[in-house]
Amino acid sequence: MNNNLIFGIRPVAEAIESGQQIEKLYIRKGAEGQLMQELKDLIMRHRLRYQEVPVEKLNRLTRGNHQGVVAQTALIEYVSLDDIRERVPEDETPLIVAFDGVTDVRNFGAIARSAECAGAHGLITPLKNSAPVNAEAMRSSAGALTAIPVCRVGSLRMTLAQLQQEGYQLVAASEKSRKLLYDADFRKPTVLVMGAEDMGISPAIMKLCDEQLAIPMIGHIESLNVSAAAAVMLFEVVRQRIG
């Protein structure tokens, strides 16, 4: 049984009103009625997003009387961007990892694990088009997702632009760049931006980045899995900063 699922109109409404952090929210397509409309109004007031799905999906999630709505609560407590910045010790240079379209939970968890091991101070992930922090992500992170702060944002672009204005350099991983990872300077506040498994970093985010860096390849395959690429980049940061 999935212990972080809540189903039924009233239980889901009570979870929202009590401030529980909702990871995913599913409502049956075409669901109507006064109680359902009240729930949708509550969702709008709390600025939550939901997906309309066929009833078969809801039935796969739970055998209980879901009344057309299932919510998945977060397994971690998300923090604000201010929380991440305030937790950086005064004698350390900030290092943050941002996810742009990483939807595979195992990749998300593996990157979180590498980030925590490399001493990163936080992760930033968008509300839409991103991997949920579910049980599989937690397993892949080997517990790192309970140790490293995670911030969810409505607009990744605006958040990165804000950090850029505060003096952070935005560094994109891109196999198409002519500049190599080892030619960059990571001894200043840095956000490493990792892109989607299939499409990479979106053009709008890539245009914003200060650096586009490639990991040198000797073999015939052109690129690494995103979690492997993140690990290589993170530990180049470590090498420069402890060296």
Image (cartoon, grey):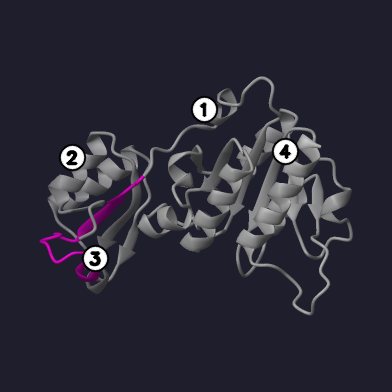
Crowding around mark 3 (Cα neighbors within 10 Å: few <14, some 14 to 19, many 20+) is some
- Mark 3 → mark 4, Cα distance in angstroms: 39 Å
Q: Is 3 within the magenta?
A: no
- Mark 2 → mark 1, Cα distance in angstroms: 27 Å
Between circles 2 and 1, the one closer to the viewer is 1
What segment carries the magenta color?
59-75
Residue highlighted by disc 3:
61
Tag 3: amino acid: Leu
Relative to 155, is 18 on the left or the right? Answer: left
Say the numbered circle drawn on residue 14: 2
Tag 4: amino acid: Thr
Residue located 67% across and 63% down the image: 200
Say the numbered circle drawn on residue 190: 4
Q: Position of residue 153 (x, y in %)?
A: 51, 42
Residue highlighted by disc 1:
83
Q: Secondary structure at mark 2?
A: helix
Between circles 3 and 4, the one closer to the viewer is 4
Q: Secondary structure at mark 1?
A: helix
Q: Is residue 108 visible?
A: yes
Q: Pick the residue in front: 208 or 149.
A: 149
